Amino acid sequence: MEAEHIQALLSAALPDTEIEVQGEGGKYLVAATGSIFEGLNAVKRQQTVYKVLNEHIASGAIHAVTMRLQAPSEA
């Protein structure tokens, strides 16, 4: 799975969120800033992203995801 594909999936699911995805070979870094993360702890923020990616993680297309997630007030 390409980083661009992951970025497109996340952008569609998390509108008004600035998203950058880097990586290859099943290992990716997701950096995202958006109001959707406001007031959420780190676990809830990660769950928001995993909800979008779980199908691809389960299929083996994605092996590892490192996340840097923040609200605009933290940027």
Image (cartoon, rainbow, N blue to C red):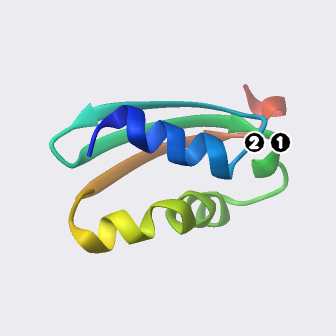
Image coordinates for residue 47, horizontal then vertical, percent: 58, 67
The residue carrying mark 1 is 35
Is the residue 74 above or below the residue 54 in the image?
above
Which mark is on residue 55?
A: none
State left or right for residue 6 relative to residue 72: left
State left or right for residue 24 relative to residue 71: left
* Residue appearing at x 29%, y 38% in the figure: 2
Q: Nearer the viewer, residue 71 or 54?
A: 54
**Location of residue 69 by image quarter:** top right
State left or right for residue 66 relative to residue 73: left
Q: Nearer the viewer, residue 25 or 38?
A: 25
Is the residue 10 above or below the residue 73 in the image?
below
Kindly identify the amino acid type of the residue bearing the numbered disc 1.
Ser
The residue carrying mark 2 is 15
Image coordinates for residue 15, horizontal then vertical, percent: 75, 42
For numbered disc 1, what is the local secondary structure?
helix
Residue lying at the far bottom of the rendered structure: 58
* Residue appearing at x 35%, y 51% in the figure: 65
Q: CA distance from mark 2 to mark 1?
A: 10 Å
Is the residue 30 above or below the residue 73 in the image?
below
Q: Are marks 2 and 1 in contact (CB under 8 Å)?
A: no
| N-terminal-most mark, 2 or 1 | 2
| Disc 1 crowd, CA 10 A, few/some/many (<14, 14-19, 20+) | some
**Location of residue 64 by image quarter:** bottom left
Kindly identify the amino acid type of the residue bearing the numbered disc 2.
Pro
